[in-house]
Amino acid sequence: MGKFSSFRDKLKSAVSRIRAGSRKEVEEEKQEAPPLRLSAEAMSFIRSFTEENPGRAAASEGSKNAARRIFAVFREYSGDNAVITTLRITPYAYKAMLRVAVAVSAAMSFFNILGLPWVSLAVSLFYISQLGNELRKKQNRFRKFFVTSEAYNVHAVVEPEGECRNTVIFTAHHDSAEIRKKDKGVKGILSSIVPMAVSYSALTILSLILLLIEMTRGSFFGFPHYSIVILSIILLFPLLSAVFYLRSCSGKYSIGAGDNASGIAIITALLHYYSRQKADGQGLLSTRLVFASFDGEECGTEGSLGWFRDNTHLISDETYVLNFDGIYNEKDLVFLAKDGNGLIPLSFSLASRCSRIASSMGYHIGVGKLGLFGGETDAASASVMGLPAVTLTSMAPGTETPAHTDDDTPDKISEEAVSEAISVAIKLVAETDEDEQKAPHASYLDSSRHYKISKY
């Protein structure tokens, strides 16, 4: 019994030493300080980028300077494979559509009061159809009256060693959001999209009811009851909240560290990593990588839609788009499977796949969506073009972030969140390429480990 006990103690001791050695090895790898650290490099980029380009209105000189800075970095990493392109966008399209909504609602009330609900309903349905085209396709018949401006997009490409069979496109945007004044009380409520939508819907329903009444009575062009006149006028006032909304726009633009210098920093670090890998003879076998930064995301994702339309030559049979937008806290990260104010579906299968990859690495990143009035991201543009796309963000509905405020500074961004985003992206690429890779090179991204990206 004594000999057995002694043997058992020695065995336990040996196992403990093995485990301790394994833990030490992992800890050493965690604490290793290589020449370049991806997450640290990304954080450094965010600080310098926002310091040099603090406010970046879409299609403004500030946004163009930001694009030039990104192009310079892309060119440093990928040489002639970096490209800067120009396009025309309508940076005030949304504001213009709000002004049109006010005019349309006034016309609807006027026609209802005159006893012409069918005209009111026709005007409303026409506007709704054009608004739908604007939200889904960035096209509407009012656009010819909108002012356009020149914008810059930037992209770089890392080609595979062999024949291209797959393409992974990493995207972000470099313009920043306009800061809105935060009003309180009734004025604050009216300075919202919600009362506009509710009142417009009520006016449309009222027009339909009046039309049905006229059809039932068999008398058109009849002057309505005074209560209808009063109701039409009352319903017009909430739509004037559009005026309050437009007045709440300060004309000042956010520093945009999280939204979206964080996304630019991530794709820049990824470009650096894969460019180094290829230079060291460890390039991907059959997967093309594209890194793109767009202007105009904050005014309707026009920059990205134009880019996807103009760069179909970079798309292969199997193409995935992973967009980074608003990376703040790792606890709030989600992969969006619905975009464009809830009107544009993204790829649920790709979102689930990315979530599974994150889970395999010890991260907890679920699948979420943007609902009505939830805004949109550049992944919507890829989806409109028929590409499987998702957005990784910390800005899902119900999450408090400093986005779109003057408090959107680099210190609000968690390096762990940036690290997780980079890790998942690299693992997605590895999975995409591994079917074609005959002899995959060793990766520091062991799926059983949970630690920061640390080296090239």
Image (tube, grey):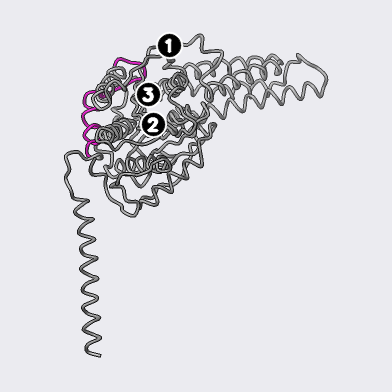
Q: Which mark is residue 148?
A: 1
Q: Is residue 398 above or below residue 114?
A: below
Tag 3 secondary structure:
strand
- Residue that extends furthest to the right in the rendered view of this protein: 218
Q: Nearer the viewer, residue 215 or 277?
A: 277
Identify the residue position indicated by label 2 in the image.
288
**Given contact means CB atoms under 8 Å apart, are the residues at marks 3 and 1 in contact?**
no
Residue, x 37% and y 21% (percent of image)?
A: 295
* In this rendering, the label closer to the viewer, 2 or 1: 2
Asked if residue 73 is among those painted magenta in the image, a careful observer would answer no
Residue, x 19% and y 54% (percent of image)?
A: 28
Q: Main secondary structure of the magenta part?
A: helix
**Kind of residue at badge 2:** Arg
Q: Nearer the viewer, residue 37 or 438?
A: 438
Residue, x 21% and y 34% (percent of image)?
A: 44
Tag 1 secondary structure:
loop
Q: Label 3 vs label 1: CA separation?
A: 16 Å
* In this rendering, the label closer to the viewer, 3 or 2: 2
**Kind of residue at badge 3:** Phe
Q: Is residue 405 above or below residue 252?
A: below
Residue 419 drawn at (x, y percent): 29, 43
Q: Is residue 407 visible?
A: no
Residue 232 drawn at (x, y percent): 63, 22
**Given contact means CB atoms under 8 Å apart, are the residues at marks 3 and 2 in contact?**
no
**Given contact means CB atoms under 8 Å apart, are the residues at marks 2 and 1 in contact?**
no
* In this rendering, the label closer to the viewer, 3 or 1: 3
Residue 258 drawn at (x, y percent): 31, 34
Q: Which mark is residue 294?
A: 3
**Which mark is first along the chain, 1 or 3?**
1
The local crowd at label 2, few if under 14, some if 14 to 19, many if 20 or more residues have their Cα within 10 Å, is many
Tag 2 secondary structure:
strand
Range shown magenta = 40-61
